[in-house]
Amino acid sequence: MKVNAYAINSFAKTTEGGNAAGVVPNADFLSDVQMQKIAAILRFSETAFVLKSNLADFRVRFFAPREEVDLCGHATIGTFYTLAALGYLKPGSYLQETKAGILGVEITKDLSIMMCQPPPSFFETVKKSEIADSLNIETASILEDLPVQIVSTGLRDIIVPIKSLDILDTIKPDFEKIREISRKYNAVGYHVFTLESINNSTASCRNFAPLFNIPEESATGTSNGALGCYLYKYGKLDFNLASHIIIEQGYSMKKPSEILVSLDVDGTEIKGVKVGGKALNFTSIIVDIE
């Protein structure tokens, strides 16, 4: 059986940048086993499958090469860009049903995609020495005035504040240790960032998720939604900047990416989270499965 799929680079800053995702529209005829097989064949960090929904405009399921995940930011960007490029959707607001809940997505006139994420949840803090050891850096390389903390806007990420861009760029992780610590704290992985940037952005980051067979990811939507909330909670963003956060990622992989985060805030309360960006390199793929 041949299945029509598409590849798209989400959050791309340049044609070489972004994070590639697979998208399979009209996936209602596929079984769970077939979806997992397609994701394994495509070998993107996540592949999205678009199905009918009684609760929203679409139901979207996200599969990593080895297992299903509740939500994926860059695959959501890829999904709605693909549906717009194929003529299924016009610019406007839509709802997607996911395992993380029913979430809003906006397609702008220039085909940028902004997606709503669940409000943030802040969980336990993690010892900096434990994290530093797994990143092969000194504990002193982690900022003193910010915690290493698990934050979620759909997926649990360990947010790690690093002192400088130089340190961030030279990190050589111990992926086995990161895998063990991620499993210990029931987290997807590490989202490591610095407030220094290349292009006068809010922050620069790297993302490590070896537990899900992703050593490093060039652009992550859910993680950067969590990062934006973390920065606001700990006073690194004022009210005026909260709605226009720009985060760099992927530069260490030579895949320049730009992720936009917009927070709806009322005093100390974060009432809404949107994450988005552009998509490039839209291509068709035929997947042959038994």
Image (cartoon, helix red, strand yellow):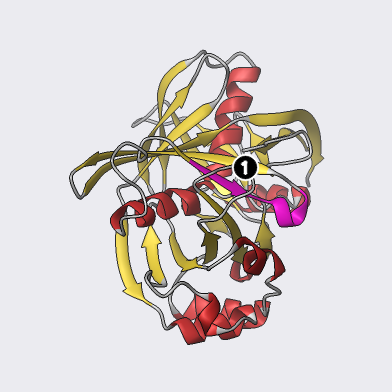
**Count of marks, rendered view:** 1
Residue 249 sits above or below residue 259 on the image: below
Q: Is 278 left or right of 101, judged from the image as shown?
A: right
Q: Which residue lies furthest to the left in this view?
A: 267
Residue 186, position as x, y percentages in the image: 44, 73
Is 78 situated left or right of 124 in this image? right
Which residue is at 59% across, 19% downward?
Answer: 84
Please identify the quarter of the rendering in which residue 24 is found: top right
Is the residue 94 above or below the residue 185 in the image? above
Residue range in magenta is 246-254
Quarter of the image for residue 13 reads top right
Which of the image's four quarters has the N terminus?
Answer: top right
Q: In this view, does 104 lie to the left or right of 141?
A: left
Q: Nearer the viewer, residue 150 or 179?
A: 150
Is residue 27 visible in the rendered structure shown here? Answer: no
Image location of residue 166, percent across then percent down: 66, 65
**Residue at mark 1:** 199
The kind of secondary structure element at disc 1 is loop
Left or right of 284? Residue 116 is left
Residue at 78% x, 29% y is 284
Assess whether residue 79 is covered by the magenta stretch: no
- Where in the figure is residue 44, as x and y percent of width and height? 71, 50
